[in-house]
Amino acid sequence: HLQLIKPFMTMLTSIKAHLALLLLLSHDHCVDAQCTVPTGLDTLDPGTLAQVEAMRANVPFLWLPYAFPFINEIIKPETPVHFRIGQIHGSTVYNAVARYHLTALDIWGRNMFRICQPTTAQEELDYKLHEVITAAYTFYYSGISIMDTVEDIIKPIFSEQVGLNPDLLMLDPPDQSTPWGIAKMIVDDMTESLKADGWNADGKLTAKHNPLPFSDFSLVGANGASYEPYDIDTTPRTKDHWPWAPLMDSDGMGHFSKQQHVTPFIGFTGRLYGMNRSHYESFTSPPPQYDYEAETKVVLERTRKMASNDTQKALLEYFDSKYTSILPLQIDYSIGAKHSLFEFWYYEMVLVNAMYDAVLLVWKEKVRHNAVRPTTVVHDLLGDKLVDTYAGPLTQAQFIPATEWQPFIRAMPHAEYPSASACICTAYKETMVLLNEGEDDIGLENPLTHTVPGKMMLRCQVCLYLESHSR
């Protein structure tokens, strides 16, 4: 990954331009003379308000109790899909809280209706409560709209622990002066925009009947531009090119499947959110310069050492998903920095959009280079030769046939190069530094500490001490 970060410095120049555009959303715009007077709090019974206030006293943000159950659910799809979900969700909640800001525009650059600013001390208290409840409703409704499987998980938390009534979202027509009305309008607006975002999320670009969501497709645009489905390259490898080959997946319960390259089209058809299209299309990464025999020795030795290192295994599991590792660090950072509700969602919106565009860019290059995965290389180069390396979960290193070697974390169904992890994590770091006016140091009284739980019956927990965004 360290080798692969450098090519993305050019790409980050465009990400910075993207961020500069998003940062402009909250500056130098005239306050709308027409605003909406907030209503709805008086319709909530005193018990509900008391429960909400009690929750606010115990957690920094009202939606926090159901945030992590939601995050744990959205990482179940393949990597690019959960970055799309994160981009949608973060942008949607930002759009809602932006209604309470004096000048902020939504992610489309629109100056939509605003909630009137308070003029008295009591109005200030009600205004803050109104904003907090709006964010809670938007978080909830956006979550269940993106992934209906999450409703059964977060609805009890939303209604019983937080104390809010989800049925208010069903009022028709929605009243844009109420928290639930704002949430419904904002989420429905975002949902409508996703019907043509180039991800084939409903599968209808592939088949009208029994469609498969996120499946590959062919398309000719109105401007004559076209996309043809990805074809597995079965030509023999050469000195300069070894094409990606699908591996066998298993759920460990008797189901086996041959991999298909996940969302190969998104780098060509996916909607960008801020990055300039011509700059995006002009960017290319250099061809990989792998010495496959040398790389094979390196990966077998690395996994041999890892086999007896529970700390490294815990870190590998933890950082495998960026949504359950680096994004929770942003939540911890915002809490430590005492960010306002708007500041939190502003940071979140910028981050998820930057990382989303980074995913599209790296996917375009993955498909273009179509490079082989390490598992295929080890199996094909070494065959049944006995190698001293990682021999499977909960075992020490052993001599095994090279054809039986597997990485500790499943090899994802996409081409190897460039590294999505290197690109996304670098984009995260660069974004956080830019948002903090060029400061890499976290700047909190104490460094962020994050406990990494051991999984797969590992015996350790790892506590990370993070003094900087680079760290």
Image (cartoon, rainbow, N blue to C red):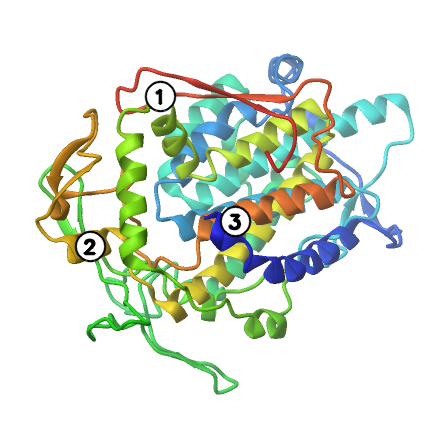
Q: Are marks 2 and 3 in contact (CB under 8 Å)?
A: no
Query: What residue is at 68 percent from the left and 23 percent from the top?
Result: 336
Please state if 375 lies on the left or on the right of 112 as rendered. left
Q: Secondary structure at mark 2?
A: loop
Q: Which residue is nearer to you in this view: 333 or 82?
A: 333
Rate crowding at label 3 as few (under 14), some (14 to 19) or many (20 or more) other CA atoms within 10 Å.
many
Rendering coords of residue 164 (x, y %) = 55, 25
Let me know if residue 119 appears in the view. yes
Q: Secondary structure at mark 3?
A: helix
Check the image and report above or below for 164 versus 383.
Answer: above
Circle on res. 454: 1
Rendering coords of residue 179 (x, y %) = 65, 35
Let me know if residue 173 appears in the view. no
Instruction: Using the rendered view, name the quadrant where residue 458 is placed.
Output: top left
Query: Amino acid type of disc 2?
Result: Leu
Query: What residue is at 75 percent from the left and 52 percent from the top?
Result: 105
Q: Which residue is mark 3?
A: 424
Q: Which callout, 3 or 1, points at the residue further toward the start of the chain? A: 3
Q: Which residue is nearer to you in this view: 36 or 406?
A: 406
Check the image and report above or below for 263 versus 175.
Answer: below
Q: Which residue is nearer to you in this view: 336 or 160?
A: 336
Q: Which residue is nearer to you in this view: 17 or 219?
A: 17
Query: Amino acid type of disc 1?
Result: Gly
Q: Secondary structure at mark 1?
A: loop
Kindly report the distance in space between the C-alpha atoms of the residues bearing marks 2 and 3: 24 Å
Q: Which residue is mark 2?
A: 247
Instruction: Using the rendered view, name the quadrant where residue 315 is placed.
Output: top left
